[in-house]
Image (tube, rainbow, N blue to C red):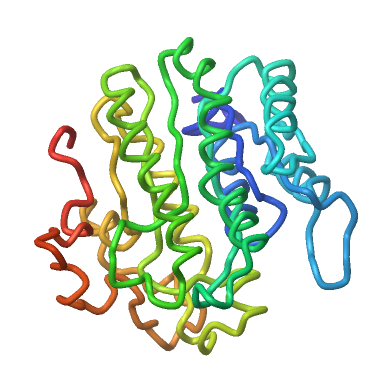
């Protein structure tokens, strides 16, 4: 290699769309993929800085550009199909391709059914499962034409043990996981993979901080999910698809067992929040199998 030249970065020439990338996990994923050479479409609703909400599509785009790649900030309300189509059109006009879609936008609601108004139910579903479906639907023609693509949804393996007190939220998140399983099967062998990804522990994010989810010593850094995404999108999309992955288990499958660098508190290993506690009365009701035992469909690797 000539003096002063840099080796090509792993994702050079690739384009990634990351929804909800103005802060937290989405921002971390965008910056990780940018650091590896991908051009990034930064999406979200925040266009002006607010005292209680750090980050805008423009500030993150500047962070991306500082890593030596191109960035396209696009204001997108993922509940709006027209806005999603416009985002795809703008991406193709700017970059000419879409290689990766990370469906990261999310809404949180942990309440009993009786405490969940339909307006809140609709909001959670429109931002979680419906938006993931709409965004995936919108990028699919481009990915199929290219013969290459990776779609990741940020949702857990399906497990009936989690439903109590979170019914609306779980239905919306499991819908995302079903999208990964079903769409992955539909696209098998066509060069486009669809997988779900979820953390084994709580993650430092806007939600964990503002909703005070446990002590910070029980968190991992968002970089663990960013690194997992980076690794997953390097898998063969023809075979590594239709799976619901847990970050820690995925890394273990790659021979990576020491995850101490991801601790939010470097001196404390956080407790696992996945897998959840086994409740036989739910998991075996009416002879049903414990769904989370079959995270990867037998159809694929």
Tell me if residue 8 can be seen: no
Q: Determine the residue positioned at 21% across, 45% down.
A: 296
Looking at this rendering, what residue extends furthest in the top direction?
145
| Residue 88 coordinates in the image, percent (x, y) | 67, 24
**To which quarter of the image does residue 171 belong?**
bottom left
Residue 239 shows in the view? yes
Image-based side of 159 in relation to 153, left or right: left
Q: Is residue 3 above or below residue 268?
A: above
Q: Nearer the viewer, residue 233 or 80?
A: 80
Name the residue located 47 percent from the left edge and 12 percent from the top edge: 146
Residue at position x 71%, y 20% from top?
89
Residue at left offset 18%, top offset 68%: 283
Q: Position of residue 140 (x, y in %)?
A: 50, 22
Question: Residue furthest toward the left?
Answer: 287
Give 26 or 9, whichever is nearer the viewer.
26
The correct choice, above or below, for 57 with respect to 225 in the image is above
Residue 236, image x, y percentages: 30, 29
Q: In screen coordinates, is 1 left or right of 236? A: right
For the C terminus, the quadrant is top left
Q: Position of residue 195 (x, y in %)?
A: 36, 41
Quarter of the rendering containing residue 268: bottom left
Of 137 and 45, the residue lying toward us? 137
Count of number-bearing discs = 0
């Amino acid at each position: 290699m000539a003096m002063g030249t840099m080796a090509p970065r792993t994702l050079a020439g690739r384009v990634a769309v990351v929804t909800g990338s103005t802060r937290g996990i989405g921002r971390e994923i965008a910056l990780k993929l940018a650091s590896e050479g991908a051009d990034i479409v930064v999406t979200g609703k925040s266009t002006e800085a607010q005292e209680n909400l750090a980050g805008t599509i423009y500030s993150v785009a500047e962070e991306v550009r500082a890593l030596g790649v191109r960035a396209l900030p696009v204001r997108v309300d993922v509940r709006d199909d027209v806005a999603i189509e416009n985002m795809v059109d703008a991406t193709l006009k700017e970059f000419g391709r879409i290689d990766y879609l990370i469906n990261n936008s999310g809404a949180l609601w942990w309440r009993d059914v009786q405490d969940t108004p339909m307006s809140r139910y609709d909001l959670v579903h429109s931002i979680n499962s419906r938006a993931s479906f709409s965004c995936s639907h919108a990028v699919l023609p481009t990915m199929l034409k290219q013969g290459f693509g990776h779609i990741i949804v940020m949702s857990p393996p399906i497990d009936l043990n989690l439903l109590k007190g979170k019914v609306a939220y779980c239905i919306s998140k499991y819908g995302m996981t079903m999208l990964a399983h079903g769409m992955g099967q539909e696209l098998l062998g066509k060069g486009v993979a669809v997988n779900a990804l979820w953390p084994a522990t709580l993650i430092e994010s806007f939600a964990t901080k503002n909703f005070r989810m446990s002590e910070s010593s029980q968190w991992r850094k968002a970089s663990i999910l960013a690194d997992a995404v980076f690794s997953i999108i390097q898998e063969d999309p023809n075979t590594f698809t239709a799976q619901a992955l847990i970050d820690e288990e995925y890394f273990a499958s790659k021979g990576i067992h020491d995850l101490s660098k991801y601790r939010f508190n470097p001196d404390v290993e956080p407790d696992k929040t996945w897998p959840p506690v086994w409740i036989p009365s739910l998991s075996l009701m009416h002879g049903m199998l414990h769904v989370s035992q079959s995270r990867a469909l037998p159809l694929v690797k």
